[in-house]
């Protein structure tokens, strides 16, 4: 006998995602909760990338020449990630959410400098 109705497709995007285990030495400290809207997650990811870019900029100011080149490559990668995330967010078919997602952070115009903190 054959089954007349196929099984529904499996969507693995709604499960809890945990991280921060220190190479599995303890239970996860952090998690991404199920039910987070994609728009909210992308806005938060853009903010995280911008913060990583700013931290890399500060580290690059104090680094020696070989490390400065590596940090420059990291900065370029972070800029590319931010551009990709913004394009994905632009192309996302947004559904009405309650409450509305946070505002998208503005594009970085000028990185912070070490002397801003001294």
Image (cartoon, helix red, strand yellow):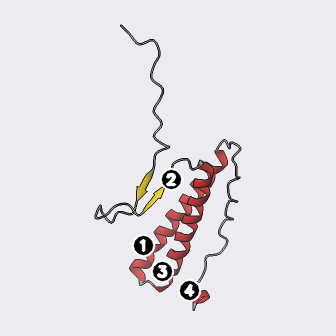
Q: Position of residue 37 (x, y in %)?
A: 60, 48
Earlier along the polypeptide chain: callout 4 or callout 2? 2
Alpha carbon of mark 1 to alpha carbon of mark 4: how far? 18 Å
Earlier-in-chain disc, 4 versus 3: 3
Question: Looking at the image, is 96 positioned above or below residue 117?
Answer: above
Residue labelled with disc 4: 114
Label 1: state its secondary structure. Answer: helix
Q: Quadrant of residue 53?
A: bottom right
Mark 3 residue element? helix
Query: In percent of the image, x 38 and y 60: which residue is there?
Result: 28
Between disc 1 and disc 4, the foreground one is 4
- Above or below residue 80? Residue 68 is below
93 relative position to 62: left or right: right
- Alpha-carbon neighbours of circle 1 within 10 Å: few (<14), some, or many (≥20)? few
64 or 37, nearer to the observer: 37
Q: Which mark is residue 106?
A: none
Quadrant location of residue 102?
Answer: bottom right
31 sits to left or right of 97:
left
In this figure, which residue is indicated by the disc labeled 3? 59
Q: Position of residue 97 (x, y in %)?
A: 69, 47
57 versus 8 height, above or below: below
Q: For numbered disc 4, what is the local secondary structure?
A: helix
| Residue 70 numbered mark, or none | 1
Q: Quadrant of the N terminus?
A: top left
Q: Residue at x 48, y 26 (%)?
A: 8
How far is mark 3 from mark 2, CA to CA? 32 Å
């Amino acid at each position: 006998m054959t089954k007349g109705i196929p099984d529904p497709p499996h969507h693995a995007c709604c499960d809890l995602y945990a991280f921060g285990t220190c190479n599995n030495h303890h239970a996860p400290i952090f998690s991404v909760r199920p039910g987070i809207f994609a728009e909210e997650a992308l806005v938060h990811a853009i903010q995280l990338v911008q913060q990583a870019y700013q931290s890399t900029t500060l580290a690059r100011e104090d680094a020696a020449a070989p490390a400065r080149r590596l940090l420059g490559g990291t900065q370029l990668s972070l800029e590319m990630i931010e551009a990709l995330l913004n394009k994905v967010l632009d192309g996302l078919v947004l559904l009405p959410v309650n409450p509305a997602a946070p505002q998208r952070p503005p594009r970085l115009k000028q990185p912070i400098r070490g002397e801003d903190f001294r």
